[in-house]
Each structure stands twice: as structure tokens, then as C-alpha cells.
């Protein structure tokens, strides 16, 4: 196994294990076992578990952005349809076991915000980076319809707050049904928010 492969396997293991068990409950030994690498290989690539968490957050956002790029959500002519398509993709992703569709960085930041400031900052940056395209489309939809009274950034943050809250519901209930219904409510809210200005 190459050094680069060992690093990627550790990142993939971190994403899977932390989504399933949480950051605090995932040990370096368990990560090494899941990745099929030695502890020496771990410390060759990462000084600490926190360093691995920071790198895993970046890899997770890269992976998530790839899913959205392939989904075609930005291919619609109307910017409002693009915003709604973003939410539709989120709804479609709510399938399978809970760790399969919940958010790595949301899981981590809930645990570490007060104890690991560097990891909290990495999670915040990941959320903001992922939301940047959505914020652009919200701004375009607001401009196209003359919508005022809030900022594109505040609505993008609200969308993410509902998504993360939906993941909490999914974890509490052990399945995606309540989460999906919450996101369908979110879609209706966003549609009404803009379409009031079309009347």
C-alpha cells in the first residue's frame, strides 16, 4: 500500500466511523483498524486525531460538492428553480442507514465546538464553502423577483440549519422519514417566500 493510499483510507475510515459513532467515540486504534493501516502509518500522515478530523472535513465537503455538481441542480434556467433543486437533491439523499446520509461536519461540530477550536473552525469553513453556490443562486432569485427583507446569506444559513436539524431528527428516530418531511416543509417555505412576489 502506498503512503497516499494509506492517507486516503484513513480519511475514508474517519468519515465512515465518525458519521456512525461520533468524533469522541472514535479512537485512533479503531480508525487504523477500519482503514487497515498501522498506527505508525496514522502518525506518519496526521499528528493527532484532530488533524485527521480537519482533513476529513475537507474531504467530506469535496465529496459532497461532487455529488451536487453531478446532480445538475444548477442547470435550470430560473434561479428559484435552482434553489428548489438544491433542496430536492437534499431530499433524495435521505435514504439508507442514518450514517450514510447524515453530515460528518455537522456531527463533529456539535461535539467539539467548545473543546477543539481548530476543528470547529474547519467545520464552519466547510459549511460556508458548501453554501456559497446556494447563496449565489438565492441572490440571483432575489434579484430576478425584486425580493427584499433578508439577505441571501441569511436564507442559505436557514436552509442549512433546517438540514442539520433534520439530521438530528433522523438520528433520534433511526430513519429518514421525519427528516425528509422537514425538508419538504423547507421547500414549500422557500417557494412561498419567492412566489408571493410573483403575484
Image (cartoon, rainbow, N blue to C red):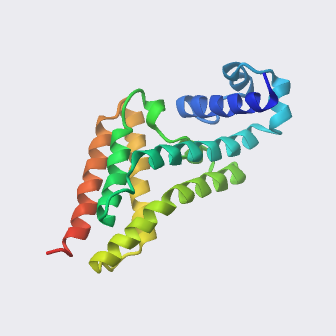
Q: Position of residue 181 (x, y in %)?
A: 26, 43
Q: Position of residue 2 (x, y in %)?
A: 80, 26
Evaluate whether residue 25 shows in this view: no
Is residue 141 toward the left or the right of residue 154 in the image? left
Image point (31%, 76%), residue name:
144
Image point (38%, 36%), residue name:
170
Q: Is residue 165 above or below residue 129?
A: above
User: Considering the image in quadrants, where does the C terminus appear?
Assistant: bottom left
Evaluate whether residue 81 shows in this view: yes
Q: Position of residue 153 (x, y in %)?
A: 46, 69
Is residue 190 toward the left or the right of residue 132 in the image? left
Q: Is residue 129 above or below residue 60?
A: below
In depth, the one of 197 and 21 nearer the eye is: 197
Q: Position of residue 182 (x, y in %)?
A: 29, 47
Image point (60%, 28%), residue name:
17
Asked which quadrant contains residue 95, the reply is top left
In depth, the one of 74 and 21 nearer the eye is: 74
Image point (26%, 48%), residue name:
184
Asked which quadrant contains residue 104, the reply is top right
Is residue 36 toward the left or the right of residue 38 in the image? left
In depth, the one of 143 and 15 nearer the eye is: 143
Amino acid at each position: 500500500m502506498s503512503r497516499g493510499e494509506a492517507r486516503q483510507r484513513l480519511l475514508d475510515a474517519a468519515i465512515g466511523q465518525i458519521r456512525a459513532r461520533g468524533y469522541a467515540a472514535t479512537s485512533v486504534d479503531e480508525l487504523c483498524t477500519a482503514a487497515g493501516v498501522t498506527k505508525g502509518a496514522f502518525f506518519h500522515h496526521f499528528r493527532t486525531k484532530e488533524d485527521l478530523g480537519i482533513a476529513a472535513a475537507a474531504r467530506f465537503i469535496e465529496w459532497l460538492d461532487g455529488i451536487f455538481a453531478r446532480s445538475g441542480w444548477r442547470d435550470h434556467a430560473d434561479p428559484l428553480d435552482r434553489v428548489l433543486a438544491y433542496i430536492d437533491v437534499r431530499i433524495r439523499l435521505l435514504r439508507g442507514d442514518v450514517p450514510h446520509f447524515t453530515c460528518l461536519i455537522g456531527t463533529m461540530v456539535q461535539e467539539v465546538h467548545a473543546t477543539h477550536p481548530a476543528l470547529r473552525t474547519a467545520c464552519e469553513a466547510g459549511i460556508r464553502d458548501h453554501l456559497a453556490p446556494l447563496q449565489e443562486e438565492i441572490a440571483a432569485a432575489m434579484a430576478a423577483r425584486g425580493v427584499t427583507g433578508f439577505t441571501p446569506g441569511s436564507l442559505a444559513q436557514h436552509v442549512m440549519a433546517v438540514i442539520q436539524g433534520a439530521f438530528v431528527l433522523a438520528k433520534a428516530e433511526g430513519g429518514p422519514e421525519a427528516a425528509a418531511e422537514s425538508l419538504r416543509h423547507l421547500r414549500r417555505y422557500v417557494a412561498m417566500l419567492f412566489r408571493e412576489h410573483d403575484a
